[in-house]
Amino acid sequence: FGVHPRQSMPLNALWQYTALDHLNDLPWPLYVLWGITDVTFLVTIVFGIRWAVRNYNASKRLVFEERRMDVPLGLQHMQVLALCPFVIGTLACVTMLRPSVAYAMELNIAILSSIVVGSTSRYFLGLIGEPPLPDQLLARTARKRWWCGPLCGGVNATLPSLGFFWSKESHKIKLEDIHTARIMVQAFAWVYIGVSCASAGIGMVPTPITQEADGTCVCDNMMSGAKGTVITVLLVSATFIGMAGFSVITAGIASILENEVDRGMNHVDSSQSNQEFIENFKLREKACTVQIYMLLPLLLPILMALPLGISYKGGSIPVSIVESNELQENGDWSTSGRTITCPIYDRQVTAHVTYACIVSAAMAYASARNFWYYHPGRDAAFADQRMKELNQGEGGVLLRQQVESPPSPFKWTYV
């Protein structure tokens, strides 16, 4: 993604600009983007409110019927996953009206996307339970080359080369694999947030604005050269690393659940039990929703590299530029300059506005999927009951007995 050392209309020159104040002076493609953003944001609101009502009823039932102090941790993760699309969609709508807040939107999207990815990973891992149950369940998984690509019998489609180091031969997934995958997901989150902070800080540095012969306004691009290349490489690398780790976590947990359902329920038909269990949790469908957030870091660099730019016939703003500063002998100083008229929706601003529109559409899709796949209360209750039944099936039952001896209040035994 080559970045030209001279960029178009800078966002930091638009702090006083609001699109609603210039409705009669806007290019027509902007109205199309507005329409898409408004409709998709409305969809996000509808599904978000419906999920919130369902969540309130389920939380109230869990707290009062089971006499809990708070809702289960799994339900708290669901609340984060279901409500983040509404916040991100709101930021996208604000950016459509005030393009100058694009950097703040992108930074908040990085933070919220990282929260969603981390919460989903923790939600999946929490289904397995506490030690020593994970070791038991992992030991029953099938042998495969987990870190290889799908063509080699693995699940890692983004970085299949890792299979040459960590999956040279078929093996059962181990705690070390899960731990490594979790670290990769965390690396994605921290790199995404860190790069977004750096981009926002560098992008808001004021630089001199000049006007070209064709009427376009340009300024020095602080993100050109080595800085822009490093940021792009970091974003691409973080996305691929994070998706690789997340795919291993998802496939590992799904394999554990499917395997336990197949072998654990002796008193019911195994295939019927398996179908009911997988249809209820839909781990792979939930994982596909999370991948939307993990692909967002790649979207803006691609848009910035495209020759975007809405017609210069509409949408302009006066910009005052300083041409000289003079210091008087008595210590006073004076400045002189002129005012130029700059088109607003050129390459840089259009890229960020288009990014906000696409993000709004993605959040509507994610919100709809969250509504269908995350069922507060039902998921937690069903998981707790079914995992207890599974652990009492073939292979022994794990009993947790309370004892008085410190430091641990629980003793784990096998029968």
Image (spheres, rainbow, N blue to C red):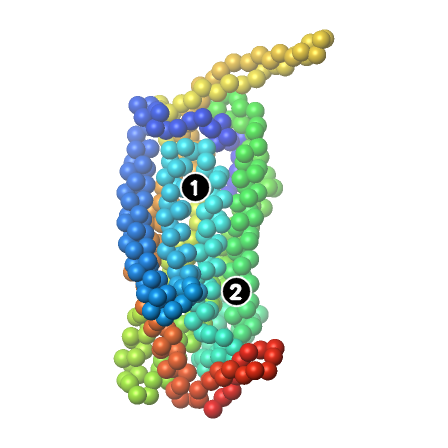
Q: Which residue is mark 2?
A: 182
Label 1 SS? helix
Q: Which amino acid, mark 2? A: Arg
Q: Is residue 328 left or right of residue 224?
A: right
In the image, what residue occupies the spot 55% across and 52% down? 191
Query: x%, y% of residue 232?
Result: 53, 46
The one nearer the camera, 258 or 147, is 258
Q: Earlier in the sequence, mark 1 or mark 2?
A: 2
Answer yes or no: is residue 368 visible.
no
Q: Which amino acid, mark 1? A: Leu
The one nearer the camera, 4 or 19, is 19
Q: Is residue 388 above or below residue 312?
A: below
Query: x%, y% of residue 398?
Result: 46, 84
Query: x%, y% of residue 341?
Result: 44, 19
Q: Which residue is mark 1?
A: 303
Quarter where residue 253 is shown: bottom left
Q: Is residue 286 left or right of residue 229?
A: left
Q: How many other residues sit within 10 Å of disc 2, few (<14), some (14-19) or many (≥20)?
A: many
